Image (cartoon, rainbow, N blue to C red):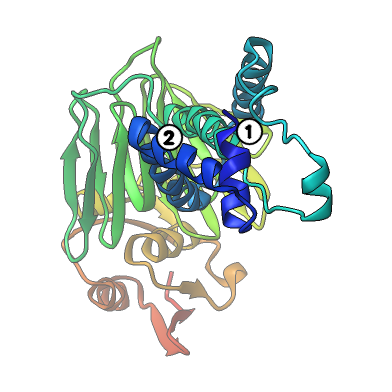
């Protein structure tokens, strides 16, 4: 019985009584066909929901769909049932024909595609031992020890998120003591570039526009796009506007923020103001660097504020300074 043809004729008001009787018998004996119609609606609704996926393996899904259709044709399931016979009466009085069996089989093929999509987005493996964590330091320095043993000290206003047992996202300043693991490198992802190490000690200052890395021990690989830079002990790598510069740093106070101590051992005043600027995050400059070439400093400070240090230099070195537009400008001294 050509059920799809008869249903089409009924919907087009061209069916004969015996055809209507046949369809009633078909409905009584084949409830599963009615369920299939309902499934088509569900699949259509589900296909709408799947439109939100941004990417999927279209090629493999299409291959699965095509092979399913080919399988139907080879088995003779689609070809015979979807042919609509046109009689002389049909030519005179066209009927609206709906190939129901064909839609049922296409729906089954769609199920293959949908199942494939869900398979694509199901992770092959899940690490149930790792739990992602976020850390924020706002008003105080904060120390974090990751599960695999790496120690991280975060400066104020720094954000850190662990993304796996050996990788983190960082924005702000942090000091890393990474546990050595030659088979599983440690990765630091930043707004500008990323760091790859097997185990070492370094400091990172990462903002949306720039990155500073100071290497204390071991070696570090810095990656920026398709460029790679290998750092050595004592290197300071700076990235700004896509430009990368590596210099040797002779500043023992680079990490003074860790213990809030500043130690100057016969440093020039130019080195001193650079350390003060970095430590307090404020601009401290010499009005005329040549005027302070013979001015060296040997002293130490612990838990001091910037203006307290500058005022002490006024007493010990006759230093004079002014505040201009938020900058501390050293104008003279008695060195």
Residue 150 pos. (x, y %): 24, 28
- Between residues 206 and 296, which one lies in front from this camera angle? 206
On screen, residue 150 above or below 333: above
Dot 1 surroundings within 10 Å: few (below 14), some, or many (20 or more)? few
Q: Quadrant of the C terminus?
A: bottom left
Separation of residues labelled 2 and 1 (CA atoms): 38 Å
The N terminus - image quarter: top right
In the drawing, does residue 39 fall left or right of residue 109?
A: left
Residue holding disc 1: 58
Residue shown at 68% from the left, 11% from the top: 74
Residue 235 visible in the current orientation: no
The residue at the point 65 percent across, 45 percent down is: 244
Residue displayed at 79% across by 39% down: 87
Element assignment for label 1: helix
Q: What residue do we see at 52% from left, 73% from top?
A: 286
The picture places residue 215, in percent across and down from the top left corner, at: 44, 34
- Of the numbered discs in the image, which one, if any, rests on residue 26? 2
SS for callout 2? helix
Percent of width and height locating residue 60:
62, 24
Query: Does residue 211 appear to the left or right of 188 in the view shown?
Result: right
* Observer able to see residue 147: yes
Nearer to the camera, 135 or 125: 125
In the displayed structure image, the side of residue 293 where residue 252 appears, left or right: left
Q: Residues within 10 Å of mark 2 (few under 14, many from 20)?
A: some
Mark earlier in primary sequence (2, 1): 2
Tell which of 317 and 55 is nearer to you.
Answer: 55
Q: Is residue 237 above or below residue 83?
A: below
Q: Position of residue 63 (x, y in %)?
A: 65, 22
């Amino acid at each position: 019985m050509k059920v799809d043809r008869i249903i089409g004729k009924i919907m087009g008001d061209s069916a004969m009584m015996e055809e209507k009787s046949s369809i009633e018998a078909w409905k009584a004996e084949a409830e599963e066909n009615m369920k299939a119609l309902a499934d088509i609606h569900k699949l259509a609704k589900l296909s709408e929901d799947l439109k939100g996926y941004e990417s999927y393996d279209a090629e493999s899904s299409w291959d699965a769909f095509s092979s399913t259709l080919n399988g139907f044709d080879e088995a003779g399931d689609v070809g015979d049932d979807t042919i609509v016979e046109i009689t002389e009466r049909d030519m005179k009085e066209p009927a609206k024909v709906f190939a129901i069996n064909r839609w049922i089989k296409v729906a089954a093929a769609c199920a293959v595609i949908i199942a494939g999509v869900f398979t694509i987005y199901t992770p092959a493996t899940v690490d149930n031992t790792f739990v992602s964590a976020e850390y924020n330091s706002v008003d105080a320095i904060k120390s974090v020890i990751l599960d695999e043993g790496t120690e991280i000290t975060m400066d104020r206003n720094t954000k850190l998120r662990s993304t796996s047992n050996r990788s983190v996202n960082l924005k702000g300043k942090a000091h890393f003591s990474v546990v050595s693991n030659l088979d599983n490198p440690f990765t630091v992802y930043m707004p500008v570039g990323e760091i790859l190490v097997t185990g070492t000690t370094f400091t990172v200052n990462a903002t949306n526009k720039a990155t500073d890395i100071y290497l204390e021990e071991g070696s570090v690989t810095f990656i920026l796009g398709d460029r790679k830079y290998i750092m050595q002990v004592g290197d300071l790598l700076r990235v700004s506007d896509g430009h990368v510069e590596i210099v040797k740093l002779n500043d023992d106070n680079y990490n003074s923020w860790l213990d809030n101590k500043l130690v100057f051992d016969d440093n020039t005043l130019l080195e001193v103001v650079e350390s003060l600027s970095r430590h307090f995050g404020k601009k401290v400059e010499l009005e005329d660097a040549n005027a302070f070439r013979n001015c060296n400093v040997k002293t130490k400070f612990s838990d001091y504020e910037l203006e307290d240090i500058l005022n002490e230099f006024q007493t010990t070195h006759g230093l004079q300074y002014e505040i201009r537009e938020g900058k501390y400008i050293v104008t003279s001294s008695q060195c």
